[in-house]
Image (cartoon, grey):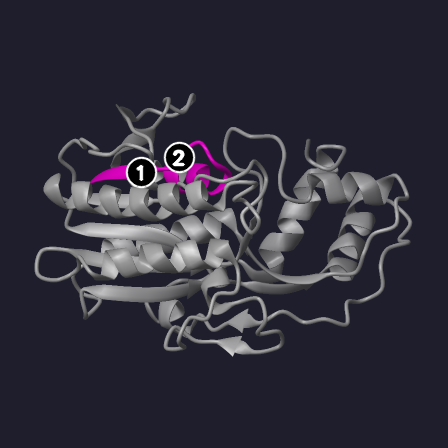
């Protein structure tokens, strides 16, 4: 299978890129520059392109997002209009170009943000009506709608609504908790927090799975939640302290519980995330490297 991939240089995109290559896919990166260390094709591309010209391919996986560095919610910075224009209009043009390039499947990396951050303590199902309350959530929902409008005979669209992604991406050193672990080890007070998480390899496995199942999923447009753990910082830092040989003086358990996404639909296809065993393996690997993973 020949797959076009956007966002390949990013944290999530690198996980997806490695998995696709490991599965024997031919991958062409769509972006500003190739990603070093991977054997892929390359096609210059930017979400600002008004008329993207893509090479013929079987499928597109869209992971790219124009945003302020290090931010998704709040990633519009000081220019929400440009953030919306690039990510909504650019995504729509990309999907249309992929259709012209012969793609019969498009996988769009969306977000749990489409459900809204106001739904604390609730359970989210793919059948729920999205109610985003951030511009980031609005933009992701608009991308979903653009894809749905193109689906039909000849094109299958798959949306993966992913939660926060942890793990060290292939080719990178830092990870989402690098700063947190450093501050904890230095004795900096840590605020309580609870969040949902999924390892990048498990998210990449979901991408590979839905691509493999394309054509037998039923309706031409499908939505799947991708989440694995409800994780309190207290638990995470206690685990890190044990593995790194540190005394634990961390935060109290968080009193606020975020909403959790049901993942039954994806699991029914055969998706099996790593759970707490994978989390423990990840933290143990950081401790063996002698630090927070940087």
**Image coords of residue 212 (percent x, y):** 24, 54
Q: Where residue 64 sits in the image (x, y, percent)? A: 39, 41
Query: Where residue 139 sits: x, y (%)?
Result: 41, 54
Query: Which quadrant of the figure has residue 246?
Result: top right
Tell me: residue 208, above or below residue 77. Answer: below
Residue for point 23% across, 43% down: 93
What residue is pinned by disc 2?
8
Read off the residue under disc 1: 5
Residue 182 placement, left or right of 222: right
Callout 1–callout 2 Cβ contact below 8 Å: yes
Q: Is residue 122 visible?
A: yes
Please name whichever residue, 278 or 256, is drawn nearer the observer in this view of the structure.
256
Look at the picture and state if 124 lies above or below 241.
below
User: Dot 2: within a 10 Å radius of its alpha carbon, few (fewer than 14), some, or many (20 or more) residues?
Assistant: many
Displayed quadrant of residue 31? top left
The kind of secondary structure element at disc 2 is: loop
Q: How many marks?
A: 2
Q: Which residues are magenta?
A: 1-17
Q: Is residue 65 visible?
A: no
Residue in front for this viewpoint, 141 or 291: 141
Q: Is residue 30 left or right of residue 163?
A: left
In the picture, the quarter occupied by the N terminus is: top left
Q: In front here: 118 or 14?
A: 118
> How far apart are labels 1 and 2 at the CA level?
6 Å
Query: Which percent across, then down, holds residue 102?
Result: 11, 43
Residue 175 lies left or right of residue 23; in this view the side is right
């Amino acid at each position: 299978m020949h797959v076009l991939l956007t966002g390949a240089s990013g944290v999530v995109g690198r996980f997806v890129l490695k998995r696709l290559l490991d599965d024997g896919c031919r991958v062409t990166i769509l972006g500003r520059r190739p990603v070093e260390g991977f054997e892929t094709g390359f096609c210059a591309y930017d979400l600002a392109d008004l008329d993207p010209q893509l090479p013929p391919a079987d499928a597109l996986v869209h992971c790219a997002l124009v945003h302020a560095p290090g931010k998704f919610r709040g990633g519009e910075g000081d220019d929400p209009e440009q953030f919306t224009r690039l990510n909504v209009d650019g995504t729509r043009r990309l999907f249309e170009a992929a259709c012209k390039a012969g793609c019969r499947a498009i996988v769009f990396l969306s977000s749990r943000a489409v459900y809204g951050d106001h739904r604390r303590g609730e359970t989210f199902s793919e059948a729920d009506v999205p109610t985003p309350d951030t511009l980031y959530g609005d933009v992701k929902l608009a991308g979903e709608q653009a894809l749905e409008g193109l689906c039909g005979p000849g094109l299958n669209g798959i949306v993966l609504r992913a939660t926060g992604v942890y793990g060290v991406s292939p080719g990178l050193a830092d990870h989402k908790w690098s700063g947190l672990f450093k501050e904890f080890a230095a004795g900096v007070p840590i605020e309580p927090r609870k969040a949902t998480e999924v390892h990048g390899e498990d998210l990449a496995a979901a991408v590979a799975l839905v691509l493999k199942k394309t054509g037998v999923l039923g309706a031409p447009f499908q939505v799947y939640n991708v989440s694995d753990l409800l994780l309190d910082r207290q638990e995470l830092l206690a685990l890190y302290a044990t593995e790194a040989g540190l005394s634990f003086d961390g935060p109290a358990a968080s009193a606020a519980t975020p909403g959790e996404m049901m993942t039954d639909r994806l699991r029914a296809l055969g998706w099996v995330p790593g759970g707490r065993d994978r989390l423990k393996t990840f933290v143990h690997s950081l401790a063996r490297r002698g630090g927070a993973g940087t």
